Amino acid sequence: MKKAIHFGAGNIGRGFIGELLVRSGYEVTFVDVNAELVDLINERRAYDIKIVGDKPEIIHVEHVRAINSAAHPEELTKAICEADIITTAIGPNILKFIAPNLAAGLAERVKVNQQPLNVIACENMVGGSTVLKGFVEENLPEEAKEAVAHYIGFPDAAVDRIVPLQKNDDPLLVQVEPYAEWDANVTQAKGEPPQIEGLTWVENLEAYIERKLFTVNTGHASIAYLAYRKGIKDIYSAMQDKNIVDMARKVWQETGDLLVRKFGFDPKKHEEYVKTTENRFRNPHLSDEVTRVARGPKRKLGAKDRLVSPATQLLAQGQKPSALATVIGAAFHFDYDGDKEAQEVQGAIQEKGLHKAILNYTQIPEESELFRMVENKTAGF
Ligand SMILES: NC(=O)C1=CN([C@@H]2O[C@H](COP(=O)(O)OP(=O)(O)OC[C@H]3O[C@@H](n4cnc5c(N)ncnc54)[C@H](O)[C@@H]3O)[C@@H](O)[C@H]2O)C=CC1
Ligand SMILES: O=P(O)(O)OC[C@H]1O[C@](O)(CO)[C@@H](O)[C@@H]1O
């Protein structure tokens, strides 16, 4: 069997990427720091995925094992030397923490295995694999840098499947929605791009990732931050609130205008894509908490992320992203005490004031019209 390594045996790891890799003929080695999870995967060597929708389905996934990279980095190095593909789904903020082990493994690999290898970060961010590549380079010994640059590709990717927090009796079971999309940038691949069922290699990844990030994730985050302000606990319930849905649709109108102008998407097809997205959020079988979708507001308020990036791009196109400014304002009110980033943002607002907090987290230029819009909307909530 071909060999895959996947960092992060969590929801997307088990519920999406791991299963596609197994279905495509790979043995998957999950790498995680959660010792219980690693032990259970190694004990069972299998797990189930439940697809929840109108036609529920159970998929039994075999040919999996796991490595605890905190306890056994040497096992990881050995696996990297033999791998045919490496993927990650650990969270954008964690990429820097896997880089030292990944760099050590790649440095060893290029000495013993001259086959090309691709490392694909499947995170909700633009250019995730490129970011990981930067961290890996910082950790590589000087003598390995040339060979790693030659043999190891870091194709950026877009991943789309809603996998909520899991509350199942079986700790390995993952409940997922039926929809799934995974695209990667073929121009950044080394060697023959690995053919994996469900993975589409594309040349214009920027269009795919911005379409996904500024529709699915922008819409989802907008709904979550507005719902949180109203005390609504889950996305399905938020979708029953007319005002929230109206505002989400205004946001989608703004991001849709941007995407159609920027990438030349067919407006009718884009409208369909938005409708599909809205219907995914209405899935009554998927219990998705508002606080999960809203998680990490510091990251989500970042200049390159789902709220501020489309807003600044629209402003540069001479548009007024008023709905986006409203939901950015709502995000500044996300004060959930179970979220460290939310607490940090709230602390900064209390300590330094709203003006400085907006400037610091969004990096929107102080003199820009967007800054004034965001400040007014935030204060007016
Ligand atoms: N859940 C979803 O619907 C989707 C999530 N994503 C993205 O996938 C990524 C993962 O999200 P989820 O699977 O929901 O999170 P998760 O929390 O379920 O899984 C993350 C896993 O990474 C592990 N981990 C943490 N630090 C690690 C380290 N240093 N080395 C190895 N493993 C480590 C955790 O123990 C956990 O098992 C995020 O970037 C998220 O934005 C993308 C699309 C959909
Ligand atoms: O995983 P993040 O970036 O915190 O954001 C949550 C988002 O990711 C997803 O889980 C999947 O794209 C969406 O449900 C949601 O918009």
Image: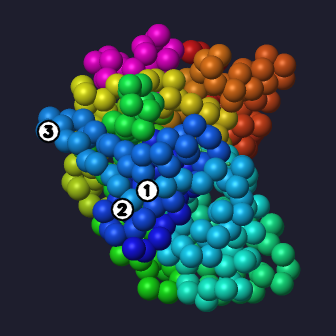
Majority SS type along the magenta span = helix
Which of the two marks, 2 or 3, is nearer to us in this view?
A: 2
Real-space CA distance between mark 1 and mark 3, rounded to the nearest whole angstrom: 26 Å
Q: Amino acid at mark 2?
A: Val
Per the image, the residue denoted by label 3 is 55
**Residue pointed to by mark 1:** 64
From the viewer's side, name the closer residue of 30 and 367.
30
Q: Position of residue 180 (x, y in %)?
A: 31, 51
Membership of 240 in magenta stretch: yes
Residue 305 at least partly seen: no
> Considering only vertical position in the picture, is 166 above or below 76?
above
The region drawn magenta spans 223-243
| Dots 1, 2 in contact, CB < 8 A | yes
Question: On the picture, is 332 further left or further right than 286?
Answer: right
The picture places residue 24, in percent across and down from the top left corner, at 32, 68
Which residue is painted at 47% across and 71% down in the image? Answer: 3
Vertical order, 24 against 151 (above or below): above
Q: Which residue is located at x 60 percent, y 54 percent?
A: 67
Residue at the limit of the structure toward the front, as seen here: 43
Q: Secondary structure at mark 2?
A: helix
Q: Position of residue 351 (x, y in %)?
A: 84, 19
Q: Earlier in the sequence, mark 2 or mark 3?
A: 2
Q: Point out the image quarter for the C terminus.
A: top right
